Image (cartoon, grey):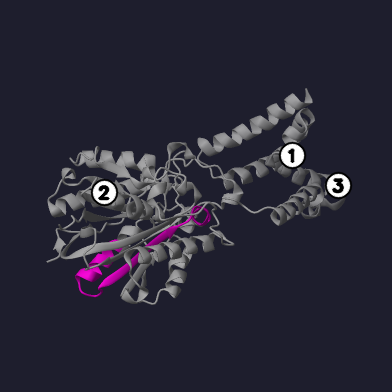
Amino acid sequence: MDYVMAFMVGGALCAIAQLFMDIGKFSQMHVMSLFVAAGVVLGIGGIYDRLIAIAGAGAAFPISGFGYFLAKGVLAQSGAAGWLAVSSGMFQFAGAILSFAIVLSFFTALLCKPKG
Amino acid sequence: MKLAGKQTWVFEHDIYIQATGTAVGPLEADGPLRESFDIAHDDLYCGEKTWELAERRLMQEAIGVCLQKGNISFSDIDIFLAGDLLNQNVTANYVARTVPAPFLCMFGACATSMQTIAVGAALIDGGFARTVLAATSSHNATAERQFRYPTELGVQKPKTATFTVTGAGAAVMGRKRGRWRITAATIGKVIDAGTANPFDMGSAMAPAAASTIEQHFIDLGTSPADYDLIVTGDLSRVGSVIVRQLLAESGYNVTDNYNDCGLMIYRPDQNVFAGGSGCACCAVVTYGHLLKEMERGALQKIFVVATGALLSPTMMQQKQSIPAVAHGVVMEAVKEER
């Protein structure tokens, strides 16, 4: 059941993004930014927490999940750091995602050469 | 007067294409016209380290094979005209280092091939040159990076997108009798149809092509039936339909003897979206395939209209529309004297 929910929710998020590109004529970059921003908003509202509870990786892996982790980091530190948490907490969780992506791309670039 | 009507140059002297050379990449070599090309690479890098260097190599090879086939040496060349799609025309400008002749860089986006032929023929007709070398190139991966997104980004493309041809074409023109004669050229006006989608160049360029073709008929008093083939550069599946509609609205029926280089160079099953594009598209199809068809006797008189979308990524980001231009050249087969 976990797999099915992850597939349904993750697939639905991707389908929405595809509709933005195909019908809304948004560029890929715009859709990406839009999803990050949407993840932040839904993360603050607590809605994305529920989505992750239902779908797990299906909600965490799309780029909106990155926005959610940005918001979650800020919320986690906001008690102690107040407004400073916006800058200090932002990358508490999202930092791991970024570092992982950078390290992975570094090794990919070392090993692979684009073919076309 | 060599200017006929508003935009058409009719050359007074007999100007010939003496030789041509073409070099292409792997997908073009796998297409239906593979036999027409002189050099074919089985790798997109063409043995170089980067795609930009690969494109430069293609242009250099096209020039080399062209001179070799025509038995022409660099010292015979009075002027070199060339262009490509990269910023600052780096392919043409760097290749020009190796050509010991005066050089004029040309940019007309994908209309560059016929721009160099038209200007070269005019220089010869005017007596400013005896022999002109013209070259044009494009490369799929360099053009994607230049105009859309780097291919490594893996951005989705819609069905209306075109696929930039990897290749280069070169031609030597002069007064010495050759197998093909250049008789007239129609220089296009820049037309902006108001579209702003870099993934649909066909719609952007079709009105410019229609304008040049129509003006050509008006200037010379000819009709579509006077040509064995009217061929556009890279309007693709989308634009080639629009240009025929626009011409039909103006009262010119261009159907049976019309084709588009972008539709000729690939098979439909080669995953090239709406068809081929890029300034090498018109160059390699014309210099490789069409001139061979004329030599064979299958075609007598053709009108080649190279179409160029004059956009830049910066202008696209600032939500500007795409201006387009099309230049046409009339080529006639020269009959063997017996």
Q: Tell me the CA gap for discs 1 and 2.
A: 70 Å
- The kind of residue on which mark 2 rests is Arg
- Residue B276: % across, % down: 42, 46
| On screen, residue A43 above or below B140 | above
Residue B278 shows in this picture: yes
Query: Mark 1 or mark 3, which has the lower sequence index?
Result: 1
Which chain does the residue under circle 3 lie in? A
Mark 1 residue type: Gly
Tag 1, which chain? A
Which residue is tagged 3?
A79
Q: Indicate left or right for B324 with B214 as reference.
A: right
Q: Which residues are magenta?
A: B117-145
Closer to the camera in the image, A96 or A113: A113
Circle 1 sits on which residue? A43
Q: Are marks 3 and 2 on the same chain?
A: no
In this rendering, do the residues under marks 1 and 2 share a single chain? no
In the rendered image of this protein, does residue B18 appear above or below residue A102? Answer: below
Query: On the image, which quarter does residue A84 sit in?
Result: bottom right
* Residue B296 - label: 2
SS label for mark 3:
helix
Which residue does the image show at 31% across and 62% down from the upper left? B19
For discs 1 and 2, the disc positioned in front in the rendered view: 2
